[in-house]
Image: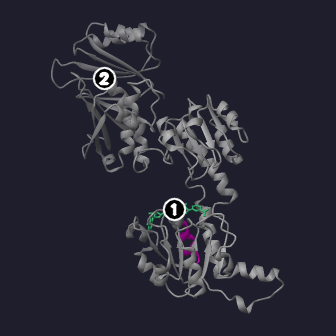
Amino acid sequence: MAKVVVAEELAPAGLEALAAGGEVVNAAGFSRQALAEVLADADALVVRSATQVDAELLAAAPTLQVVGRAGIGVDNIDLAAATAAGVMVVNAPAANIVSAAEHTMALLLAQARNVAVADASMRAGRWDRAKLKGVELNGKTLGIIGFGRIGRLVAARAAGFGMELVAYDPYVSPDSGRRLGVEILTLDELFSRADFITVHLPKTDETAGLIGESAFAKMKDGVRIVNTSRGGIIDEEAIVEAVRAGKVGGAGLDVYEVEPLDESSLLREEPRIVLTPHLGASTAEAQDRAGIDVAEAVSAALGGELVSSAVNLDAGPPADLEVTEYLPLVERMAALFVSLARGLPSQITFRVGGELADHPLAPLRLALLKGALSGVTSEHITYVNAGAMAEAKGVRIVTETSEDAREFVSLVGISGTLGERSPSVTGTVTGKGETLVGIDDMEIELPFGANMLVLRHEDKPGAIGRAATFLGEQGINIANMVVGRNVVPGAPALMGFDLDQPLSESQVDALRAIPGIEKARFLQFRS
Ligand code: NAD
């Protein structure tokens, strides 16, 4: 049973989800020394933002496989040290997006209807109806800058308020915008058309200060602006000036260049700017979801899966459903390949045919390396360190794609040369699961099981019977068996077995000694 150490307070829903998959040690409030001690035999560590997961703490946790961050930022985790140790770091990037989108709507409405100023004047004993006339959202154009996860949720909600939607995001195609009812524009076009602007960008060199004096000059008079993304994207001095000059009719800000916002910030003096102290993610639901999401990611990582929220993987674009389905197959095929090659060739050819060829293949290459390296080293190989380990061993993968997938939807193949051996294995995923459909130039069809035995034998009567009899005599039940033969008469043929129990090394040696059997390879997989 996996041991999961939770180093900080986690929402009960997250603790429950973790407890379903392992023994949970709640170490919230532990000293660093006590935490290091409890990590000595832990498989997973879950933190929020306070625990410094550095090289020293990781060294105290030699069996650790995954660090889960219940939230987004991973500044408190030394990613390089985790990667070097083969520890996957996962987070919960989507846990707070609904909360952030709803807070954006709250700020859009609050500044359009003077909610904060009205509340303050009521508490001061006044009744300022005439002074506090607002504007409607209905029929206005909302310009969304950054059309990612939160930008899209805001679009859906603003559509319900009858707003026209336009967006600027150089990484989103006009077509995908159109499908969501949003017109994708250039930034200048957006500035000239939007009555309201909402910012949903990451903070990068490109986006820092994106909305400053020159941007305000391009906007409509009376434009209203909301930022719940990151401080520093809107120039704070420039927005105060633009509000004072009447260029900007109102603003709603949740994030600031420096947080907490300086007590003497000019922003605090401007009543037409509604301010909240970085509340975008502060809801009970977002916290619950962060706990649950991170628990799911940690469980998946402990199960050996490639987790899409892993932040220290060199896997390129995230694996989609089709690719995810092929990861265990490729890993197993790679293990079989190195067993047949009796080692790791410095160049491995990875063939992908059929529909799968159009998907992101980097995650599959990692699975190949994980499977192949696990067969040749006693070190713990994970998706995280497989790439670096392969580089250190000088192993290169050459990927070839084609439309050809024999009679299957997709087909993957692994081949390479080591000394005199040039094995090749081919597989696919069918209704029966991960299936081996070829070894060398022989076609077979054998679903991968827990105990796989491959025998190469003379294509003469008797060899199959002798092998099966030996297994029977040893009390080993055959769950599945296939025979493949070469098109060239007299060339060796092949038997593939899935057995109900593992074979010992001496049993494999005994199989090799059977007359007519040329080679025997046994491989055990986690089912
Ligand atoms: P996301 O990655 O899903 O979306 C960001 C979008 O910005 C992407 O579509 C990307 O293509 C686009 N983009 C990147 N660079 C750009 C550029 N130079 N110009 C235009 N578009 C560009 O991120 P998300 O989950 O939607 O989060 C958006 C922001 O909100 C992030 O900065 C995040 O940190 C912040 N956030 C704040 C709170 C809060 O508490 N206030 C809560 C959650 C998220």
SS for dot 1: helix
86 relative to 450, above or below: below
Horizontal and vertical percent for residue 229? 56, 65
Residue highlighted by disc 1: 149
Asked if residue 154 is among those painted magenta in the image, a careful observer would answer yes
Residue placed most toward the observer, 281 or 458:
281
Horizontal and vertical percent for residue 221? 52, 88
SS for dot 2: helix
Question: What is the quadrant of the N terminus in the image?
Answer: top right
Q: Are marks 2 and 1 in contact (CB under 8 Å)?
A: no
Is residue 6 in view?
A: yes
18 relative to 286, above or below: above
Instruction: State the residue lying farthest toward the left.
Output: 489
Instruction: State the residue lying farthest toward the right.
Output: 125
The residue at the point 38 percent across, 8 percent down is: 470
479 relative to 363, above or below: above
User: Position of 245 compared to 215: left or right?
Assistant: right
Question: Dot 1: within a 10 Å radius of its alpha carbon, few (fewer than 14), some, or many (20 or more) residues?
Answer: some
Residue placed most toward the observer, 421 or 42:
42
Tag on residue 340? Answer: 2
User: Position of 240 compared to 174: left or right?
Assistant: right
- Majority SS type along the magenta span: helix
The residue at the point 68 percent across, 42 percent down is: 16
How is this picture coloured? one colour
The amino acid on which the numbered mark 2 sits, given as a three-letter code, is Leu
Q: Check mark 1 vs ligand 1: CB closer than 8 Å? yes or no.
A: yes
Instruction: State the residue lying farthest toward the front.
Output: 264
Horizontal and vertical percent for residue 368? 36, 35
The amino acid on which the numbered mark 1 sits, given as a three-letter code, is Arg
Please state the extent of the stretch shown in magenta in the rendering: 153-161
Asked if residue 364 is among those painted magenta in the image, a careful observer would answer no
